[in-house]
Amino acid sequence: MKKSVLILFMVLLLAPSAVLAVTRSVGQTVIYDFTEVTHSTPIIPAGMSAENQAKMKSAQNTPLIFVLTLTMDKVSADGSAHANSSLVNAATANASASLRDPVSDFVATLESDGEISAQYDPNMQPKTGAGGEYTNMKEVSLNSVGGQVMTHIPYFNTFAKGCALHVHDSAHTKWHEDMTDSLLGQRTFEFSSSDNGTVTMKSTVKNQYMTQTITASGNFDSTSGLVVSYHEQIENVMASGPPSSTTRDFKLRH
């Protein structure tokens, strides 16, 4: 994944992961089609041509389409699984491994409640051997991509945990979960379920810099312990500056 992403690691402090009675197996693969688009108003430098202005606006509002793949190689008794994973551009997702960008690979844990926890150590640094050569570049690359992946899925994980922690068998039940967002502090997510199984999730946080509203909806399968579909809309209204929004969609392949 060549796109540079500022690693703003979201720490989610909800209750411990719900342990669902799910069955995972070594070699099992879970694949999500993932789309993300950020809508923003770019700051146009004085004197920029109309053509370059159009390119700049297009670049900031163009959907990014990925395929997220997790292949399990170790499974725990609680239903969680260690997974060799990748987040690759959809255009190259079906190419052979030798043709894909190796920096799309990362290591993750797929929890029994469907959360995806990418392996990431913010303190990891390249190491050199006696001859000055780097000795852990593969590990550094996996770690770096893991950090990037986590910036895309913090609220996906909140949705998965919120669904798994609450049994919403009857229609229109409501509940909430608290979390600590490392960027915006303590926040509460309000959940509700409908008679068709769709779960909605919403949270609004306001501080001196901005008001952020997250609205999401989707479906969760408690039998497989997986989010089946998920749509997320993040609206940022700045105290000073133009607004922005981010939309994310995840769809489990069957």
Image: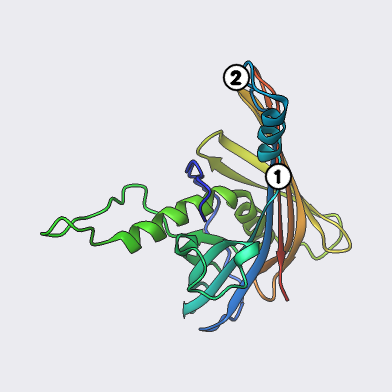
User: Tag 2: Cα neighbours inside 10 Å, few (<14), some, or many (≥20)?
Assistant: few
Quarter holding residue 171: bottom right
Mark 2 and mark 1: span between their CA atoms? 30 Å
Give the answer, above or below, for where 238 lies relative to 103: above
Say which label, 2 or 1, has the lower sequence index: 1
Q: Residue 37 location in percent, x, y?
A: 69, 45
Image coordinates for residue 181, horizontal then vertical, percent:
54, 40
Q: Nearer the viewer, residue 114 or 134?
A: 134
Residue at the spot x=19%, y=56% of the render?
Answer: 128
- The amino acid sitting under disc 2 is Gln
Nearer the observer, 81 or 192: 81
Residue 24 occupies quadrant: bottom right
**Residue at 34%, 63% in the rendered image:** 138
Instruction: Identify the secondary structure beneath mark 1.
Output: loop
Label annotation for residue 110 = none
55 vs 137, left or right, is right
Viewer-side residue, 196 vs 54: 54
Asked if one can make out residue 17 in the rendered structure from this viewpoint, the answer is no
Q: Of 11 and 147, which appears nearest the observer?
A: 147
In terms of secondary structure, where does tag 2 sit?
Answer: loop
Q: Residue 243, position in %: x, y? A: 70, 27
Task: Residue lying at the far bottom in this picture: please name it.
Answer: 26
Give the residue type at disc 1.
Thr
Residue 136's image quarter?
bottom left
Q: Kindly identify the residue that appears in the image at 56 percent across and 33 percent down.
A: 184
Using the rendered image of the protein, determine whether residue 39 is visible from the camera's viewpoint: yes
Left or right: where 221 falls relative to 77: right
**Residue at image location 67% in from the left, 30% down from the top:** 52
Q: Residue furthest right?
A: 195
Q: Which residue is mark 1?
A: 62
- In this figure, which residue is indicated by the disc labeled 2? 208
